[in-house]
């Protein structure tokens, strides 16, 4: 029995060794497989989200002409703005922002479901000399930009401004809006905030008095960019807290988006919800109620002053009589002296005779009233 049981452990040890070897082989191959899968996924993502590209029907045209601008690799159903800008190259971007572009002759276009577009653009001279480009950028959402070299025939050409140092600012923390609205904002005053953010100098040279561009956008309208210069110097490897004022128009309300740009790169976007100025609505409601009542009272006062007194009194009496028409008024009875009645005189009342005192006999008494004695002599 010992001979039979001996080989069994040896076969078991062989199977265990094979399992250990297989596990070691998988542990060695698995990282390579994961790296290959991640690289393939990255390539698929890059193929799914290609870089925006702009092509032109012509490289040169004079003022008043027209070119066709085509683009691919953009986000589907995205609103774009096309401009001819001077003092710009695809490598350095648009120097000076849209102030270097022919903004009045720009055109807006919306990409299709595949992220492509084709639209004609009139040729106009930018406000600064060439070199020039056709600058295409997204209006809302994630920022995407593409430039194509273009020559405006007959437009002056000047060298690009030299770059000062290797200073480079980068956003270190998310932006935020600080500040509160006053009671005047409730009545239509312009809402105002402070855009606060932190930047760091990632270059090897200091950045002095950097110029930022702040834009406010509402709905589908294109953002309105405004240059704001921050006074100060950011040394290499240092950071700085920057505050820039942001103000909307009077009576503004709804959802706004604040964009921050340094150079040709959008650094951050910050939403801003502005409440409706209900004080203005309340004011108009009170105005519609109070003004008619005040005008009516003033008119009645003027009429009362102008109308004559006599007619006023007559009208008042007329109104009193008309209001009392049909009513019975009872007056109290007055006692009057009785008037003599016409007719026979009333019978005389019987006179009463007063017996004369024995010691007084008036001489003036009539004879018929004198007592007579009969039977005395």
Image (cartoon, rainbow, N blue to C red):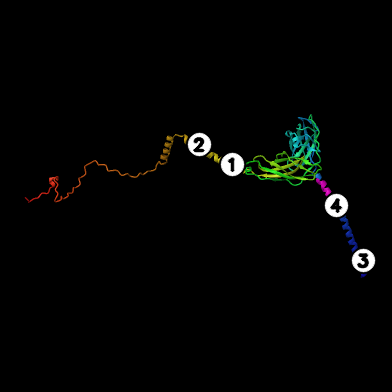
Please identify, in this view, whether the residue under mark 3 or under mark 1 is nearer the observer: 1
Q: Cα distance, mark 3 to mark 4?
A: 39 Å
Q: Cα distance, mark 2 to mark 4?
A: 94 Å
Answer whether residue 333 is magenta in the image.
no
According to the image, label 4 marks what residue? 33
CA neighbours of label 1 inside 10 A, class few (<14), some (14 to 19), many (20+): few
According to the image, label 1 marks what residue? 283
Q: Which residues are drawn in magenta?
A: 38-45
According to the image, label 3 marks what residue? 7
Please identify, in this view, whether the residue under mark 3 or under mark 2 is nearer the observer: 2
Does label 3 or label 1 sit earlier along the sequence? Answer: 3
Does label 3 or label 4 sit earlier along the sequence? Answer: 3
Chief secondary structure of the magenta span?
Answer: helix
Q: Secondary structure under badge 1?
A: helix
Q: Secondary structure under badge 4?
A: helix
Residue 315, x across and y down, in percent: 43, 37
Answer whether residue 42 is magenta in the image.
yes
Identify the residue at horizontal 87%, vertical 54% (top origin).
29
Does label 2 or label 4 sit earlier along the sequence? Answer: 4
């Amino acid at each position: 029995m010992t001979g039979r049981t001996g080989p069994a452990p040896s076969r078991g040890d062989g199977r265990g060794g094979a399992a250990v070897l297989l596990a070691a082989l998988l542990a060695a191959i698995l990282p390579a497989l994961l790296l290959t899968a991640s690289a393939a996924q990255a390539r698929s993502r890059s193929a799914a989200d290609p870089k925006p590209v702009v092509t032109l029907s012509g490289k040169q045209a004079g003022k008043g002409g027209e070119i066709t601008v085509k683009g691919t690799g953009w986000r589907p159903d995205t609103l774009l703005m096309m401009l001819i800008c001077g003092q710009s190259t695809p490598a350095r971007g648009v120097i000076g922002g849209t102030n270097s572009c022919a903004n009045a002759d720009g055109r807006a276009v919306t990409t299709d479901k595949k992220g492509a577009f084709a639209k004609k653009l009139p040729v106009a001279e930018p406000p600064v000399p060439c070199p020039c480009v056709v600058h295409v950028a997204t209006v809302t959402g994630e920022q995407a930009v593409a430039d194509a070299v273009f020559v405006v025939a007959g437009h002056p050409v000047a060298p690009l401004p030299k770059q000062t140092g290797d200073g480079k600012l980068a956003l270190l923390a998310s932006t935020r809006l600080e500040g509160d609205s006053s009671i005047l904002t409730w009545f239509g005053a312009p809402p105002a905030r402070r855009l606060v953010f932190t930047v760091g100098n990632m270059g090897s040279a200091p950045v002095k008095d950097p110029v930022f561009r702040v834009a406010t956008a509402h709905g589908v309208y294109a953002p309105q960019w405004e240059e704001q210069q921050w006074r100060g110097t950011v040394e290499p490897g240092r950071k700085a807290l920057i505050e820039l004022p942001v103000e909307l128009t009077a009576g503004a309300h709804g959802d706004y988006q604040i964009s921050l740009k340094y150079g040709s790169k959008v650094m951050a976007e910050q939403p801003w919800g502005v409440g409706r100025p209900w004080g203005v609505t309340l004011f108009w409601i009170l105005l519609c109620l109070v003004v008619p009542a005040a005008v009516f009272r003033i008119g009645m006062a003027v009429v009362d002053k102008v109308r004559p007194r006599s007619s006023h009194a007559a009208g008042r009496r007329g109104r009193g009589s008309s209001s009392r028409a049909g009513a019975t008024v009872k007056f109290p009875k007055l006692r009057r002296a009785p008037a003599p009645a016409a007719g026979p005189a009333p019978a005389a009342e019987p006179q009463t005779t007063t017996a004369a005192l024995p010691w007084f006999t008036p001489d003036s008494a009539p004879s018929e009233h004198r007592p007579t004695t009969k039977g005395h002599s």
